[in-house]
Amino acid sequence: MFVINCKNYEEIAGDNILKFVKTVEKVSKKYGVKIAVAPPQHLVGLVSKSKIPIISQHVDVSKIGSTTGFVVPELLKKSGVKGSLINHSEHRIPPKDVSLLVTKMRDLKMISIVCVKDVSEAKKYSKLNPDYIAIEPPELIGSGKAVSKEKPDLIIKAASAIKGANNKTKLLCGAGIVSGEDVSAAISLGSKGILVASGIVKARNWKKIIEEFAQNMP
């Protein structure tokens, strides 16, 4: 799994999200790599019917009906969204909510990607059996310093912790990934994929960098 979090970067605003997703579709097809995109929340509807998995950047413990301003899992599914990030370092939520949301996503047959900051959280949340655990040390996010280079032991230990908790959850590596070399390093250390944001979205040539990353996926 190769996940691109667009966050709320200006580069992706308006019709640019359509151009971005079309680029991702072409690269995904060319290299046979599964690539998911998490657009800004207000742009999800524009691309939810694309040929690649579209996921939400966040989801709330809320219900269909008279609730305002919340991201409701059931409505995301009805709109064609395939899953969601949960507990991203820039949008942390209580452990109880993480548990409720992983269960909800599983019931809806949607992809759950639980973001964690360290090995302890990876071990704790992998017991919930989400589809993916994405480990991202907060201090490296957006730094251009890849966790696979700065803290390689973190990936090894996280992979081991997840494997010890269950056999279904897969590890994604995030934070500071800016090159194909960073991608292959993360994979070699035990990650089953990557979660990347500024390294791609802020790049001058989207196609070139996405291809570079895709070529270094197994």
Image (cartoon, grey):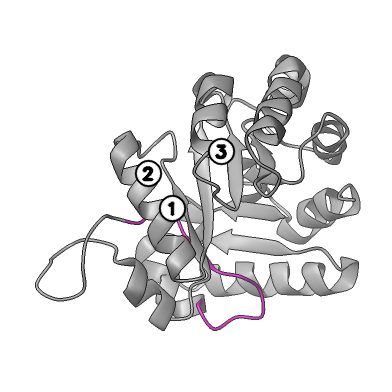
Q: Amino acid at mark 1?
A: Val
Residue 198 versus residue 108 in the image, above or below: above
- Say which element carries label 2: helix
Q: Is residue 93 visible?
A: no
At horizontal 88% and vertical 33% (from top left) the residue drawn is 188
Q: Give the alpha-carbon distance from disc 3 to disc 2, as whole Å.
A: 11 Å
Range shown magenta: 48-59
Q: Are marks 2 and 1 in contact (CB under 8 Å)?
A: yes
Side (left or right) of 185 relative to 210? right
Q: Are marks 3 and 1 in contact (CB under 8 Å)?
A: no
Is residue 96 in the magenta section? no
Q: Position of residue 22 (x, y in %)?
A: 67, 75
Side (left or right) of 170 relative to 71? right
Indicate which disc residue 140 carries: none
Indicate which disc residue 102 carries: 1
Q: Of marks 3 and 1, which one's residue comes earlier in the chain?
A: 1
User: What quarter of the picture does the N terminus occupy?
Assistant: bottom right
